[in-house]
Amino acid sequence: MKLRTTMRLAALGVGLGMLALPAAAQVAPDHPGRAVFNKSCAACHDNPGATRAATLASMQQQAPARLREVLTTGVMAPMAASLSPQEITDVIAFLTAGQAAASATWTDAIMCAADKRGVSPTASIVSAGFGVDQNQTRNFSAAQAGLKKADLANLEVAWSIAFPGQGGGTGASVLSDGTIYVTGGQKLIALDAKTGCAKWTYAGQSRNTPAIGEIGGKKVVALAIGRDIHVVDAATGAPVWKASGQPVTGTGGNIRGGVIFAKDKIVVPISASGVGSGANPRTECCTGHGSVVALNAADGKHVWEYHTMKEPEYNGQVSSLGVKQMGPSGAPIWSVPVYDAKRNNIIVTSGENTSHPGTDTSDAVIAINLDTGKVAWQYQAMAADVWNMACDTGSGTNGPNCPVLFGGDGRDYDFGAGAVVVTAGGKDIILAGQKSGHAWALDPLTGKVIWSQRVGEGTALGGIHWGIATDGVNFIAPINDPLGMSANKAFIAKPGMYTFDLKTGKPAWSYAAQPDCAGARATLVTNCETKYGFSAAPLVIDGAIVGATLGGQVFIFDATTGAVINRFDTVGPAKPLNKDVVGNGGSIDAHGISAGAGMIFINSGYGSFGQTGGNVLIAYRPKK
């Protein structure tokens, strides 16, 4: 069945704008940027409730530097290519009018006392990054987290920090001495978990959860800033090395998923795709594709690279406007890779193709040998998913570059979630979750399907969107299914939390999410009646599952029974330690849940995709 999605042009992280801007923008009618916006942006951003676009409120929180990055090197660069440098400057000034300039010294207000800034040289790694452990299970024991399941029933806010600009939904990495590493406000920050004060900062905008590893016996933190990889000393924040994270040959691109340490290497996923540029009817659609780069962890030197496909060529297709089409393209790596140490493979998951011809590497799980960069096996979960943002832009018609006009059945059912390595019943399994709503269990030697399950039909924003987890018993699948994302009138959304037995795939328990728009939440939560599913990657702590919704609520479930142990809200005004920055909670998405040092950390505020913007990191502890 052909299933198309109702979408607008937008950056996958930050949209250019929303409605034709109302008086809230607080700018003069003759502001030069207003004319640029109305001419080049407004027509494609007038329906944030049913699109991937960020809300106006979240746009107004974006730092000018972030907007410039999106317009010049990010997903929106092809759409802004026709703008002059002055027009780009003008539209940024228009969108950020009235915004207080974010000071580069904003963290001065939360610095620890001079004698409290140390990081123990003997501290062990509690959470190495997004996946927590090497197998990316996102599963903490009570000892690792410093929390028992019983503690999670009664939590209180310990502290919060407000980042200047929009929050990015990234999580924290943790050392055993209580040092946590987060990104936000154009910085990498080492925080004291107990108090929230900053031990050190390192300048640079990143959307990655920092990764912790060791080089020469010294603990270091690695992350992508722009298209470069930065490695810094975990104790001091001093730079160790900086190197390009891009492939040496062929197409490079942005690094959305975050890097990992694997033996003596740092592995970098590349999310180039052409998914945004295809929306421009004058673009020769499409170029850009996913790749993986391996760097030497000691010095950042390039070791190998893997490409999901060859470089694009003219494919013989011509759009209705007479624009030649190119391909193949797409199959980006949006997710964080996982290292399967037993078989010495890096496992990555990929996105859809964005132009013809389709490849067998799109919507796939791919195992790559760590030493050679050669493919050990691959499993394509869905063929012929060829889609880009020209497809069904909300008017009921497709733009000239929509691949479905040339054949295929584009659905945008890629893998946004990374794979997991787990052992069940004495057998190793690779787990993967897809935006189609599929939960997959694969043989780690061959990639063959052991079992699969599907929850509903899925949507372009999930189904399973940003991540999965396991407690060693069940596959834990958060389902998003935002209403209004399907053109199929018979579509039945199934947002909630679902679990499946690891050995058999049989359903265990599930929880059906419902909108909560009572009282102030009706206005605090953007698109409250449609955006309430579980999209963020869940977390397991001592037999409890921590999940969070696009409505900004945190749920804690008993992992065995599915009973709700606790539920609390993060939406609305916060009282951050840095009082000079206004803090607000919003949607919880992407990699927004993390834990360690006796605390749970929630990054609340994710304004992309018509969701509720915000900018706070909130730390919760058991009530005393």
Image (spheres, rainbow, N blue to C red):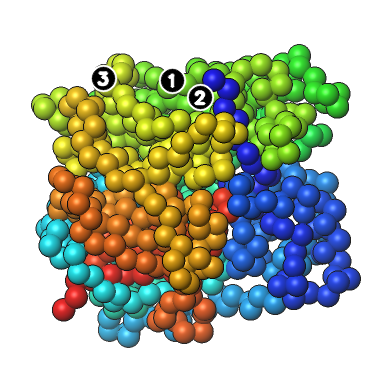
**As displayed, is residue 487 above or below residue 622?**
above
Q: Where's the C terminus, which quadrant?
A: bottom left
- Within the image, what quadrant is residue 177 found in? bottom left
Which residue occupies the foreground of this view, 71 or 514? 514
Q: CA distance from mark 3 to mark 1?
A: 14 Å
Residue 512 appears in the picture as rendered: yes
Q: Where's the N terminus, which quadrant?
A: top right
- Secondary structure at numbered mark 1: strand
Q: Classify 10 Å Cα crowding around label 3: few (below 14), some (14-19), many (20 and above).
A: some
Q: CA distance from mark 2 to mark 3?
A: 20 Å
Residue receiving disc 1: 380
Give x and y (percent) for residue 211: 35, 52
Q: CA distance from mark 1 to mark 2?
A: 7 Å
User: At 31% from the left edge and 49% from the top edge, which residue is drawn?
Assistant: 538
User: At 86% from the left edge and 27% from the top edge, which residue is drawn?
Assistant: 321
Mark drawn on residue 450: 3
User: At 37% from the left edge and 49% from the top edge, which residue is drawn?
Assistant: 513
| C-beta proximity under 8 Å, tags 1 and 2 | yes
- Secondary structure at numbered mark 2: loop
| C-beta proximity under 8 Å, tags 3 and 1 | no
Residue 416 appears in the picture as rendered: no
User: At 22% from the left edge and 28% from the top edge, which residue is drawn?
Assistant: 506
Give x and y (percent) for residue 2: 58, 22
- Secondary structure at numbered mark 3: strand
Amino acid marked by disc 3:
Ile
Q: Classify 10 Å Cα crowding around label 1: few (below 14), some (14-19), many (20 and above).
A: some
- The numbered mark, 1 or 2, whose residue comes first in the sequence reads 2
Q: Classify 10 Å Cα crowding around label 2: few (below 14), some (14-19), many (20 and above).
A: many
Amino acid marked by disc 1:
Gln
Residue receiving disc 2: 362
Image check: 473 left or right of 326? left
Amino acid marked by disc 2:
Ser
